[in-house]
Every structure is written in structure tokens, then in C-alpha cells.
Amino acid sequence: AQSVTQPDIHITVSEGASLELRCNYSYGATPYLFWYVQSPGQGLQLLLKYFSGDTLVQGIKGFEAEFKRSQSSFNLRKPSVHWSDAAEYFCAVGASGAGSYQLTFGKGTKLSVIP
Amino acid sequence: DSGVTQTPKHLITATGQRVTLRCSPRSGDLSVYWYQQSLDQGLQFLIQYYNGEERAKGNILERFSAQQFPDLHSELNLSSLELGDSALYFCASSPLRRGGTDTQYFGPGTRLTVL
């Protein structure tokens, strides 16, 4: 069975600083990987996804993530954080099989931004 | 706005009661997924429907059931409610193209409070 680990429960950064959120996955086959963001009281918004090809993927709001198969990681990065980036971030792996791509999520990393 | 709508936004009910949560997928999407987000369990996959048929089941209790109607909207029915069923319930939709990868777009969620 697939699993996702987000080692950091809570991260605090200053506005303008760089950000890296860690994600490690466990999955037997080629993974489909996603990052979603959830603002307080809101739904989940897709930031970016990796299916195949270039291991560095670009997303919305200036985010990018790098897939590293050897490390089973898919870390999310942003060069300069804005106060509006404060939210909870979820990494997910999509399990493919019998026409279903159900997502398995990590526990999330809450990001706080100091003005 | 993902294009996925969920009603109601909030639901407060008592233990032992039954409720129905409704989801309308994005235009053209045939697949609907239901997820539960709770403080202790995090985000968990419940069930998936594709074009009216059940496609996959996750950690869904027997007291819960779902269906997808010919117009592709879906309903999640929760019965004999317990305090522990209090959670945020998300619906996601995707095109689920044959042989391809799949990206899920989430609705804003329904917050269920069981008193």
C-alpha cells in the first residue's frame, strides 16, 4: 500500500525567505505525485503535479517541486514566500489500478509566515 | 474556483441522525471521489464513482453509502451518526481518461458537526 510522509508538522518562515516543504512517498510503481494547498476554511487547491518526464515541475503561485526517485521524495519549493502563502500544504500520491486514481495524503505541513 | 460544488457548506445534527451531502462535478468530469478530513485521521479516501458505477472503495464505514446519478452529481449518505463522524467531507472530480493519468479537483467541502 502507498503512503506519504510529511516530516514537518509546522514551519514558520519570514516573508521573502525561501521555502522547502518535504515529502517522502512509498509506492511500488511509478508514482503520480501532487501538492495541494488548503487555506483556512477553504477546500484543496492543486498547486502542481508530476506524472512523468521532467523531474522539476512548475506550479501555480510560483511554486515548484522536484521528483527524486532515488530518495522517494517530492519536495515543494518557493524562492520567496509571501504572507498570502500561509496555509496548510498536503503532498499526495495517486494509486493507479482498475481505473481508480485514489489519492493517499500526507498529514500536511502548516506554514506560518512572519511579516 | 475549481468548478466542483458541494452543498451544504455546514451541517449540524445530532447523534443517530442521517444526513446527505451533495456534490456536483466539473463540467465534463465523469469521476467523483469522496474524502473525509478529520483531525485524528487526516485526509482519507472514502469512495469513488465513475459514470454512475462504483469504481473503488477506501476506508468507508458501512453506515456510509454513496451514489452517482445520471446527471453525474453524487450524494454521500451518512447514517446513525456518531460524534466521531464530525469532519470535513470533500468531493473531488476528474475526467479519468482511458489509459491516462488523472487529476482531481476538489470542492470547498461540507463541514459536518455531530452533537
Image (spheres, helix red, strand yellow):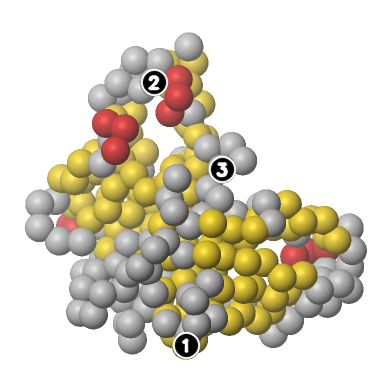
- Is the same chain shared between marks 3 and 1? no
- Is the same chain shared between marks 2 and 1? no
Give, as a three-letter code, the residue at label 1.
Answer: Glu
- Is the same chain shared between marks 2 and 3? yes
Residue at image location 34% in from the left, 15% down from the top: A16
Viewer-nearest of discs 3 and 1: 1
Residue at image location 72% in from the left, 70% down from the top: B20
**Sequence order check: which comes first, mark 2 or mark 3?**
3
Quadrant in which residue A19 is drawn: top left
Q: Secondary structure at mark 2?
A: loop
What residue did someone put label 3 on? Answer: A42
Residue at image location 19% in from the left, 52% down from the top: A68
Mark 2 belongs to chain: A
In front: A106, or A84? A84
Q: Secondary structure at mark 1?
A: strand
Q: Is residue A12 above or below residue A34?
A: above
CA neighbours of label 1 inside 10 A, class few (<14), some (14 to 19), many (20+): few
Q: Is residue B65 visible?
A: yes
What residue did someone put label 1 on? Answer: B53
Instruction: Identify the image quadrant of the N terminus of chain A.
Output: bottom left
| Residue A99 percent across, percent down from the top left | 33, 82
Q: Is residue B42 visible?
A: no
In front: B70, or B64? B70
Residue at image location 61% in from the left, 41% down from the top: A41
Give, as a three-letter code, the residue at label 3.
Answer: Gln
What residue did someone put label 2 on? Answer: A82
Q: Calculate the distance from the C-alpha at mark 3 to the C-alpha at mark 1.
A: 29 Å
